[in-house]
């Protein structure tokens, strides 16, 4: 006798949506990385999909990303997404942009391109360190923090990537 109940079955609607969503994101990542492989100065940072099928693709470059490059990538990727049929009835919207200054650094390559800039790093324990990003290795970053009331003292601090919750670039005027 067949059991029509979902007892013991972990594949509820939310789980199925998440699994399908992860597969679609993986496909979009692959298509984007193939397009970016033609120009190694640019790299994919992240792909997000909202429940409304609004696809957001964040691309960065070692020397920034000109708007023309984002437009070119948007057009090429849109055509590929339509051809791939990843969304029913091609019901999706696509935004290709560079990560804004309010977006945390996610990739090692982003840390490298921001050497010399002021950053704010939040550690896993909640401690916040602010300073100039001096160096980046495979395992850590080095910040130069300004100390003292007169801000005349400098201290170099090494922070392991494994201790970092997130890092954002500070806007300096």
Image (spheres, rainbow, N blue to C red):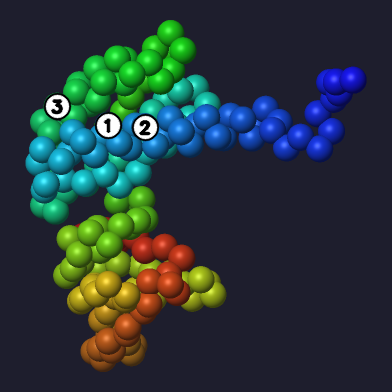
Which residue does the image show at 41% across and 63% down from the upper left? 166
Residue, disc 2: 27
The residue mark sitting in front, 3 or 1, is 1
**Contact? badges 2 and 1 (CB < 8 Å):** yes
* Residue 49 tag number: none
Q: Is residue 170 above or below residue 147?
A: above
Residue, disc 3: 72
Residue, disc 1: 31
Q: Residues within 10 Å of mark 2 (few under 14, many from 20)?
A: some
Horizontal and vertical percent position of residue 116: 17, 70
Q: Is residue 117 left or right of residue 131?
A: left
Horizontal and vertical percent position of residue 136: 23, 73
Tell me the quadrant of the picture where the C terminus can be found: bottom left
Q: Is residue 38 left or right of residue 23?
A: left
Q: Nearer the viewer, residue 135 or 121?
A: 135
Q: For the residue labelled by badge 1, is the local secondary structure a helix, a strand or a loop?
A: helix
The answer to whether residue 158 is seen in the rendering is yes
Q: Is residue 77 above or below residue 22?
A: above
Q: For the residue labelled by badge 3, is the local secondary structure a helix, a strand or a loop?
A: helix
Image quadrant in which you'd find residue 46: top left
Which residue does the image show at 35% across and 67% down from the upper left? 120
């Amino acid at each position: 006798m067949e059991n029509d109940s979902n007892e013991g079955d972990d594949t509820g609607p939310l789980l199925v949506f998440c699994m399908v969503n992860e597969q679609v994101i993986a496909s979009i990542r692959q298509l984007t990385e193939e397009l970016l492989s033609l120009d190694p100065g640019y790299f994919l940072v992240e792909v997000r999909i909202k429940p409304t099928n609004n696809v957001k693709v964040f691309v960065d470059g070692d020397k920034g990303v000109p708007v023309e490059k984002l437009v070119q990538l948007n057009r090429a990727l849109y055509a590929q997404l339509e051809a791939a049929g990843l969304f029913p009835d091609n019901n999706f919207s696509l935004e290709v942009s560079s990560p804004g200054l309010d977006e945390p650094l996610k990739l090692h390559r982003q840390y490298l391109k921001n050497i010399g800039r002021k950053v704010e790093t939040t550690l896993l324990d909640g401690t916040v360190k602010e300073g100039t990003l001096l160096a980046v290795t495979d395992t850590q970053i080095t910040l130069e923090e300004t100390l003292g009331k007169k801000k005349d003292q400098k201290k170099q601090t090494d922070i392991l990537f494994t201790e970092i919750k997130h890092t954002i670039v500070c806007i300096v005027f």
